[in-house]
Image (cartoon, rainbow, N blue to C red):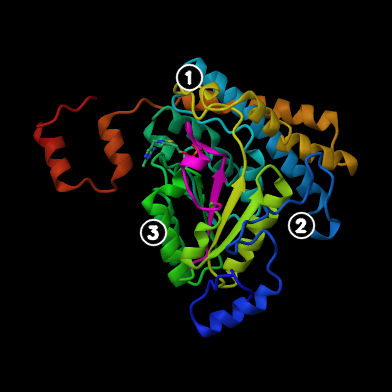
Amino acid sequence: MGPGHITLDRTASREAQTASREAQTASHEVRTEDVEPLRLLDPEGRVLDERRLPDLDEPSLKELMRRMVFTRIWDSRAVSLQRQGRLGFYAPVSGQEASMIGSEFALDKDDFICPGYRDMPPLYWHGYPMHQLFLYSRGHQHGGRVPEGVSALMPQIIIGAQITQAAGVAMGFKLRRKPNVVIAYTGDGGSSQGDFYEGLNVAGVFRLPVIFFVSNNRYAISTPLHRQTAARSIAHKAVAAGIRGVQVDGMDVLAVYSAVREAADLARRGEGATLIEALTYRYGPHSLSGDDPTKYRTKAEEGEWERLDPLVRFRNFLLARGLWSEREEEDTIGQAKETVAKEMEKAESAEKMTIPGLLETMFEHLPPGLEEQRSGGTMIWPK
Ligand SMILES: Cc1ncc(C[n+]2csc(CCOP(=O)(O)OP(=O)(O)O)c2C)c(N)n1
């Protein structure tokens, strides 16, 4: 333990564990100094160090690419559908595919996702049906009805408000001795919310199997990172909570996968929570509700991040290994367009919402006050 290093654990036994891990602590793990993001591919997709690559077989590597391409097409279709008035609220994801896809890919099916409004891709790849995500966007009550067997909450529009819940689910896993972990997604803006610190604190105290995944895309709508926090990095916020803090290149899908996989393995072994800060960028606006990125970002900055496009970078990596082709990419694009069209049709043919329907979705048994209103006619109930 050298000068400037903070002991993250409080008890002697934990100190011993920390000390044994200390020797292996990699440069992407937070101390008090600046942190270097974990990065496995250079911006052109060349491997930086073969020995650090995650143990993924060829079909898995291809699947990562397939999911990222699919997601980019789905995103661009969703933007058009919103412009046509067929979707409501939509927060574009292009640029953030590596963070979103790589993180979910590192989880098991029974691991639990607490998403924010932008995190449709991890939800979808975890089993949440796309037409329900479209219904959510349209404000339809069935959009938030999580299907049986899908380990997730519906997307949370209130920033940071799923962080304490994530700690709660993790507490449930721990009490029931389940080998599962929880991941909570939020943004750089979300990491300034009170709930964020509360969730991290509880996770630290009870050593909970949870991963707090901050997609730091540098802006909370128009608020830039330097107006968001004076911390050296968002990953540093882990230090005060006594949990592990890690920074990762969020445009490098293999690095994101590795960071989450390692955090999940540690959590499953009872070593508690990790805060992961993924450095990423959204290429589009915050949402389609009217913000104009040209008012708060420069063309030069956008160009720098476009050069790091996670799809191009990973495609280069796969091409160098003979694992990707134009044909596969075109097939994936076709599949994405077809799936989006079918799922949109499903969403558009959903039954219309009614107020009784809304209450039935919310309550298994209507509370007496509401029951009385319904039967007593003090409220007008549409048919
Ligand atoms: C508690 C709360 N305050 C304000 C808002 C309005 N709001 C919606 S998104 C947003 C910015 C969030 O930015 P960030 O957490 O960085 O996530 P990003 O949208 O960049 O993914 C704000 C302030 C909100 N939804 N919830």
Amino acid at the residue labelled 3: Glu
Confirm or deny contact between disc 1 and disc 2 (CB under 8 A): no
Task: Choose top left, top right, bottom left or bottom right for residue 55.
Answer: bottom right
Q: Is residue 56 visible?
A: yes
Q: Which residues are magenta?
A: 208-233
Q: Is residue 339 visible?
A: no
Q: Comparing marks 3 and 2, which lies closer to the viewer?
A: 3
Q: Secondary structure at mark 2?
A: loop
Q: Secondary structure at mark 3?
A: helix
In the depicted structure, whether residue 196 falls above or below residue 176: above
Residue annotated with mark 1:
86
The image position of residue 111, as x and y in percent, is: 55, 57
Residue annotated with mark 2:
54
Amino acid at the residue labelled 1: Arg
Confirm or deny contact between disc 3 and disc 2 (CB under 8 A): no
Task: Choose top left, top right, bottom left or bottom right for residue 339.
Answer: top right
Residue annotated with mark 3:
198
